[in-house]
Image: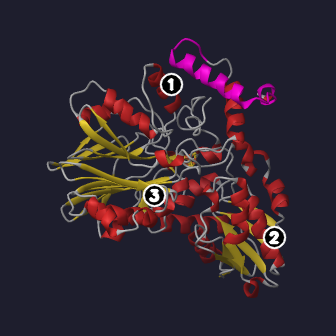
């Protein structure tokens, strides 16, 4: 790998990767060396920071003003993606759409926009995307016209075989309008030889690999689908006679819908005037629910994978206090995602909870900011220490995770400058050592501080008195599900699926 990393011309690196993928797609040549291709991928990813795929999806069938309810659902799911939002609706005769590269309330800034989205069927999407010219075309739902009429899709997750599928289709003459892997799904549906859209969607989804929670909108049906591993959550609910699906149940609460159950891993549910009909076309595989949803991503008031996020986060905090106790005066959280775990830590340790950091809520979440320059700026302006709370105190600070460590380091500096005499850092998850290929935006392996540093080295880097992470078994034992049902690849480096050399999440964006 190091030999390839010495090559300076990134275009050549990508070209080489692309050619290798192409030959693999043709079935003729296998990659000579796994590390060789990973080196190419890593080099490309270090230099480019491209598309991101944390998303929230919502769908509703059978409600008057479905678009209005979808707007509210997307509003509740705003934390899953802030740089693009869209709604597609159907009144049975025509498909309507509106989308834009902003937050939900800015995209749908006037009631007239929602009034034009007619019908009792709608799907919606929140997306995080890169800045730049190409981002607006990737905003979902993606809507196409094909031989059966109109079809729209909204996708949460990342496909791991998108590159080889797209190269193969482009070789056959397909033209793509976006750099989103979700468009590949629409192409596959449109190319299917099956008779009806339900079978065509099944046919298409059997060809894709990786993580997908999806909602489709046809002229008369809502289709919800979840990959057989079940990486991303997707819940099913009722609002009187209407059916609702959403990434998280907080989107049900805002419209008064009742959570019924999850869309099962491998389930394709077709919802229309005949009710709900489910298909299970996939081979049975191990479940791989993303545990990071519980740690950081989902809202604490949501139910995902059958468990209440708040309850699990509290348990994580309690377990952390059991595993990594410390003698201190106060415990503070890194707001907001760590608040609940911090309460758990306080309950178990008996140390007083204090609000020691104030967060400016008008700044985006640091973890998903796209560029180093912006991320560092965020760290400085996002939090402010409460001096009266911290002065002359031995402080435990609880965070849900450490990614690069740069933000944490700045926070520690702030706490010390505010008068904390000791700072003890506690993390309610294990060290993150590997990137995610299934739909959570993370930096490259090299940028993950724990991929190359020991806990003690990180402690020194952060300049804290003590540093303690939650153990992997401790984290897994907090759930009502069996620990083997979860994906923990970013903590273990063991991926539940084969990661193809061409599955880097940015590969479709900047090809050469
Ligand atoms: S690698 Fe980590 S973030 Fe990605 S799906 Fe698995 S647990 Fe979630």
Q: Position of residue 25 (x, y in %)?
A: 51, 19
Which secondary structure lies at badge 1? helix
> Element under label 2?
helix
Instruction: Residue 12: say if magenta.
Output: yes
Q: Which residues are magenta?
A: 3-30
Give how far apart the Cα atoms at labels 3 and 2 are.
38 Å
Where is 35 relative to 94, above or below?
A: above
Mark 3 secondary-structure assignment? loop
Q: Vertically, is 26 above or below 449? A: above
User: Would residue 10 be counted in the magenta stretch?
Assistant: yes
Q: Whole-Å distance between the Cαs marked 3 and 1?
A: 42 Å
Q: Residue at label 1?
A: 167
Q: Which residue is mark 3?
A: 480
Q: Which residue is mark 2?
A: 413
Q: Nearer the viewer, mark 3 or mark 1?
A: 1
Query: Quick one: 447 or 423, which is closer to the camera?
Result: 447
Tell me the chief SS of the magenta region. Answer: helix
């Amino acid at each position: 790998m190091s030999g390839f990393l010495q090559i300076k011309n990134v275009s050549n690196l990508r070209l080489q990767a692309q050619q290798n993928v192409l030959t693999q797609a043709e079935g003729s040549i296998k990659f000579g060396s796994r590390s060789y291709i990973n080196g190419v991928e890593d080099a490309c990813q270090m230099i480019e920071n491209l598309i991101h795929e944390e998303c929230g999806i919502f769908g509703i069938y059978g409600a008057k003003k479905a678009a209005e309810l979808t707007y509210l659902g997307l509003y509740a799911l705003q934390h899953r993606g802030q740089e693009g939002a869209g709604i597609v609706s159907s009144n049975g005769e025509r498909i309507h759409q509106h989308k834009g590269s902003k937050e939900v309330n800015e995209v749908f800034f006037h009631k007239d926009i929602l009034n034009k989205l007619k019908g009792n069927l709608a799907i919606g999407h929140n997306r995080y995307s890169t800045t730049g010219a190409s981002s607006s075309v990737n905003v979902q739902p993606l809507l196409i016209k094909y031989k059966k009429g109109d079809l729209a899709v909204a996708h949460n997750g990342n496909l791991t075989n998108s590159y080889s599928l797209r190269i193969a289709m482009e070789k056959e003459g397909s033209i793509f309008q976006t750099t989103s892997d979700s468009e590949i799904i629409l192409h596959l549906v449109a190319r299917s030889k099956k008779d009806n859209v339900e079978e065509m969607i099944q046919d298409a989804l059997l060809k894709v690999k990786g993580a997908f929670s999806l909602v489709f909108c046809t002229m008369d049906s809502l289709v919800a689908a979840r990959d057989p591993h079940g990486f991303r959550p997707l819940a099913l609910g009722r609002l009187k006679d209407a059916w609702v699906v959403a990434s998280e149940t907080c989107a049900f609460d805002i419209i008064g819908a009742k959570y019924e159950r999850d869309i099962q891993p491998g389930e394709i549910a077709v919802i229309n005037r005949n009710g709900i009909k489910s298909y299970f076309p996939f081979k049975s595989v191990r479940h791989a629910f993303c545990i990071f949803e519980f740690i950081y991503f989902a809202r604490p008031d949501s139910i995902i994978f059958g468990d209440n996020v708040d309850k699990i986060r509290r348990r994580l905090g309690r377990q952390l206090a059991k595993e990594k106790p410390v003698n201190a005066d106060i415990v503070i959280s890194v707001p907001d995602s760590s608040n609940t775990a911090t309460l758990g830590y306080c309950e178990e340790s008996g140390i007083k909870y204090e609000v020691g950091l104030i967060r400016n809520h008008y700044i985006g979440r640091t973890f998903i900011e796209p560029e180093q320059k912006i991320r560092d700026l965020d760290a400085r302006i996002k939090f402010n220490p409460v001096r009266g709370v911290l002065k002359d105190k031995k402080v435990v600070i609880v965070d849900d995770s450490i990614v690069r460590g740069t933000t944490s380091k700045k926070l520690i500096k702030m706490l010390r400058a505010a008068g904390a005499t000791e700072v003890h850092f506690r993390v309610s998850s294990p060290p993150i050592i590997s990137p995610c290929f299934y739909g959570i935006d993370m930096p490259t392996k090299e940028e993950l501080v724990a991929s190359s540093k020991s806990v003690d080295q990180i402690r020194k880097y952060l300049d804290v008195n003590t540093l303690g992470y939650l153990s992997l078994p401790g984290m897994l034992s907090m759930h009502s599900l069996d620990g083997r049902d979860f994906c923990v690849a970013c903590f273990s480096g063991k991926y539940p699926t084969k990661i193809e050399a061409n599955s880097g999440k940015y590969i479709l964006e900047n090809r050469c």
